[in-house]
Amino acid sequence: AIAGLASCGTHGPEGTAPKAPIQLIPLPARLSETTDSFLLDKRTVLVAASPADRRTAELFNEWFHSLSGFELAIADSGSMNAIVFRTRPAGEKAIAEGYQLKSGKDIVTIEGDDEAGTFYGMQTLIQLFPLQSATAYWLPGVSISDQPRFAYRGLHLDVCRHFFPVSFIKKYIDLLAMHKMNTFHWHLTDDQGWRIEIKRYPKLMEIGSRRKETLDGRLEDNKFDGKPYGGFYTQEDIQEVVAYATERHVTVIPEIEMPGHALAALASYPHLGCTGGPYAVATKWGVFDDVFCAGNDTTFQFLQNVLEEVLILFPSKYIHIGGDESPKVRWEKCPKCQARMKAEGLRDEHALQSYFIRRMEKWLNEKGRQIIGWDEILEGGLAPNATVMSWRGIEGGIAAAKQHHDVIMTPGNFVYFDYYQSQGKNEPLAIGGFTPVSKVYGYEPVPEGLSAREASFIKGAQANLWTEYIGSPEHAEYMVYPRAVALAEVLWSPKERKNYDGFLERLKQHFRRLDKKSVNYAKHVFEVRP
Ligand code: TNX
């Protein structure tokens, strides 16, 4: 059987085969259709010369095998009945993550401006396939020239409130890459659990990774069985995840929260808090008064020692240091904190938090890394090289851009995927809010009123999945898809090409692709129109 001559497709010019419509998500920057088609059969060869391109060809082959049941040969060269994956040598005109894809009668070529570009060309190629098992496939003739609108295209996952297995983390990353997203923000530490193995501090795993009781009864799948809840990733797990992500051109940014959201660490090592404890890993959601003590030099030593191990595991340029929701009440009553403020000439506790973040930034900068923090790091003065994640609306992002600091937009109303996505009666319990897919699609990351220079500091955006009310992989997928598909198009495609009706039309075909990957996306979320 030959797949690709869709019976319901649009008819080509006289004498040519009827073709299935091309339905790409995210939309490429430029696409034109040609009258040629490429016939892929069992003799088609994948051509890839460099190790990176070869890996991209292998990843294509894995996907192709899941569709057709057979694999294609991979060779160093070939120009007939071939699909060529080729990253151009670094040159002046290279556009980061850009690629060209051309399919004609004899050959398909994907030329990346860099290795990621070739990988994204491969993802586009996959979307040209009819989703049927067959022995041969017609691919439409196209000429595509593509590149992302934003450099930072992210998705976050909170694994502290609920723990998710490595297999799911990998699937999460694979889906991200499929949508040409390039950053996975891994929220690894919080009040309710410490989830990364740190060899120097074993109590973080023994104590910090577990909590004593089930959480408040509003969680719909809370069993109240009294069993301890927990989990953490070993350093081997993390290496496996980072390697998996790297092959898919996804950067993993770890988040180690400071100075707030620290109860799991304090429960493990009580001397890191202002009162000395005792503390317990939190069994409720929310914000807690006990935070890392800013008056205590051992706190900084501890965090640096933790980060020493983190830096070995994560090659990312950025390390997320949290910085959000850190109450100041303990610091106000802590003699050591007050003494520090006096010695450093700090006006108030916000300035002390700023001191805390600057001190950690300086240390990380010396190790060649940059920090990202939630927008509270603006309070009391921004650390000199910090990137700001604007989550309490867009104001923090605007303020940071005006100070010529890099910004990643993550405003709650548009890209918090723990919010409700429909008003259907059967929606699972969510944290609140209402962010339908249409609202995500309509999101524009660059705020109005910035100068061109200021706007250039908006590096992109990210959706966050906080998991207080999300206890399983299936539920997480339900919250993220299809909203992440909409965000992917916001971040990749040219602004002028955006069109919600066209998106919904293409989404139908895209759902088949998600079905193929067994994604538990939300199917009934379109009752609200923009
Ligand atoms: C605020 S967003 C938090 C998280 C919660 C979330 C719930 C942010 C930086 N901090 O700790 O999980 O609200 O939506």
Image (cartoon, grey):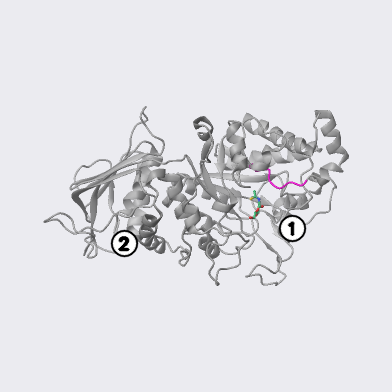
Residue 265: percent from left, percent from top:
73, 49
Q: How would you rate the neighbour count of disc 1 (Cα within 10 Å): few for under 14, some for 14-19, many for 20 or more?
A: many
Residue 85 in view: no
Residue 345: percent from left, percent from top:
81, 28
Residue 359: percent from left, percent from top:
71, 33
Which quadrant of the view contains residue 316? Answer: top right
Foreground residue among 177 and 47: 177
For mark 2, give the secondary structure. Answer: loop
* Residue sitting at x 38%, y 57%: 501
What's the magenta region? 321-327
Residue 411 in view: yes
Asked whether the beta carbons under mark 2 and mark 1 sit within 8 Å of each other, the answer is: no
Task: Kindly identify which residue carries mark 1.
Answer: 282
User: What kind of residue is marked 1?
Assistant: Ala
| Above-or-below relation of 183 to 9 | above
Q: Is residue 326 magenta?
A: yes
Q: Left or right of 415: which side holds 431? A: right
* Residue sitting at x 80%, y 46%: 273
Task: Kindly identify which residue carries mark 2.
Answer: 131
| Above-or-below relation of 425 to 271 | below
For mark 1, give the secondary structure. Answer: loop
Residue 16: percent from left, percent from top:
14, 55
Q: How many marks?
A: 2
* Residue sitting at x 56%, y 35%: 406
Which quadrant, please, contains the N terminus? bottom left
Secondary structure predominantly adopted by residues drawn in magenta: loop
Classify mark 2 as within 8 Å of ligand 1 or not, answering yes or no: no
In the rendered image, the residue lying farthest to the left is 15
In the rendered image, the residue lying farthest to the top is 92
Query: How far apart are the two marked residues, 2 and 1, measured between alpha carbons?
Result: 47 Å
Q: Is residue 490 magenta?
A: no
Label 2 vs 1, first from the N-terminus = 2
